[in-house]
Structures are given as C-alpha cells and as structure tokens.
Image (tube, helix red, strand yellow):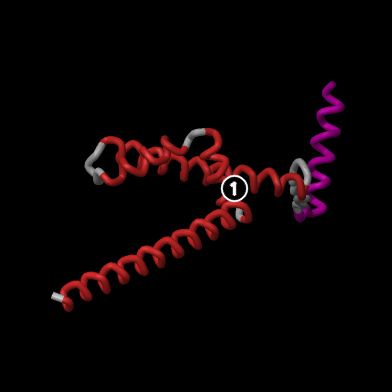
Amino acid sequence: MVDNEDADFIGYVDSIKRKEGVEKSEALAAKQRKIWRETTWAGMLISSVEKIGAAPFFVAIGNSFEEGESSTSFYLVSLLYKIGIITSGILSVYLIGMIMKMISGEEIVIEQEVVIVEEVTRSQVEAEERAARGKLKKR
C-alpha cells in the first residue's frame, strides 16, 4: 500500500511541476507577444484591428477556411483575394508610371529629321523650267 501512495504522490508532484512549466512558458510567450505588438508594424496593425473591433470579422473569415474549399465563403474570399491581387498589380504599374513621368517630365518627344536626297539631272531641271515658262506665257 505504501508503494501505491508514493506513486500517487510522485505523480501529483510531477503534474504540479508540469503545470508550473506550462504557466512559465505561457507567461514568457505572452510577454514576447506583447513586445512584438509594441515594436513591429504587423503587431501594431493587429493591435489597431483589435481596438476598432474588427477582430471577430477576421476570425469568422479564418473559420470559413476550416470548412473546406467547397464552401461558399471560401469561394468568395478566394475570389476577393484574386481581385485584390489583380487590382494591386494594376495600381502598382500605374504608380510606377506616375513616378517615371515625374522623373522624366510630362512627355517624351522624339523628333526625327528626314532628309530625302534626289538626284536631278540638268536636262530635267531645264525641262521643268520650260514647262513653267510655258504656263506663264499662256496666262
């Protein structure tokens, strides 16, 4: 009987030690989470989402993913995600274009001078002069 009671007591002490270890690790994790929320942009964003009360909305979206890919909510969220990716791509190209336009100026004008070289013989020039004189005489 003494052995059984000793085993129960040892089991009890082990469970208390495990609970203390879990409590310490949870306290350390909570402290690190608090530091992360205070020092990083992502942590500040999550804190602001919680302050405005939008956290339950995002939790509901997360729960919709647990229902699987066949659910309507998953389909809608994935569709909105794709639309957002496409829109952000278009906006980024537009913004890069605006920045390049600011750097280079309003328009880029390319001017090309075209020179046509024509070889004319003396006889052709004289024929054109005679034709011009003939027109003047007729008037």
Outermost front residue: 2
Relative placement, left or right, of 137 versus 118 is: right
State the residue at coordinates (19%, 72%). 5
Depth order, front residue of 95/10 = 10
Instruction: Say if the magenta span includes residue 138.
Output: yes
Looking at the image, is 101 positioned above or below residue 16? above
Residue 120 lies, in percent from the top left, at 78, 53
Quadrant in the picture for residue 60: top left
Please name the residue that numbered disc 1 is placed on: 44
Quarter location, residue 81: top left
In the rendered image, the vertical position of residue 55 relative to residue 21, given as above or below: above
Left or right side of 67 for 27: right
Name the foreground residue: 106 vs 65: 65
Give the residues drawn in magenta, as a range.
117-139
Specify the principal SS of the magenta part. helix
Residue placed at 25% from the left, 43% from the top?
67
Which residue does the image show at 76% across and 41% down from the upper left?
106
Q: Residue furthest left?
A: 1
Q: Between residues 60 and 130, which one lies in front from this camera angle?
A: 60
Q: Residue furthest bottom?
A: 3
Q: Quadrant of the C terminus?
A: top right
Q: Position of residue 105 (x, y in %)?
A: 78, 45
Q: Quadrant of residue 1?
A: bottom left
Seen in the image, is 50 located left or right of residue 64? right
Determine the residue positioned at 36% across, 63% down. 19
Report helix, strand or loop for mark 1.
Answer: helix
Q: Residue furthest top?
A: 139
Q: Is residue 124 above or below residue 28?
A: above
Q: Please, what is the three-letter code of the amino acid marked with disc 1?
A: Met
Within-10-Å neighbours for mark 1: few <14, some 14–19, many 20+: some
Q: Position of residue 15 (x, y in %)?
A: 30, 67
Determine if the magenta segment contains residue 83.
Answer: no
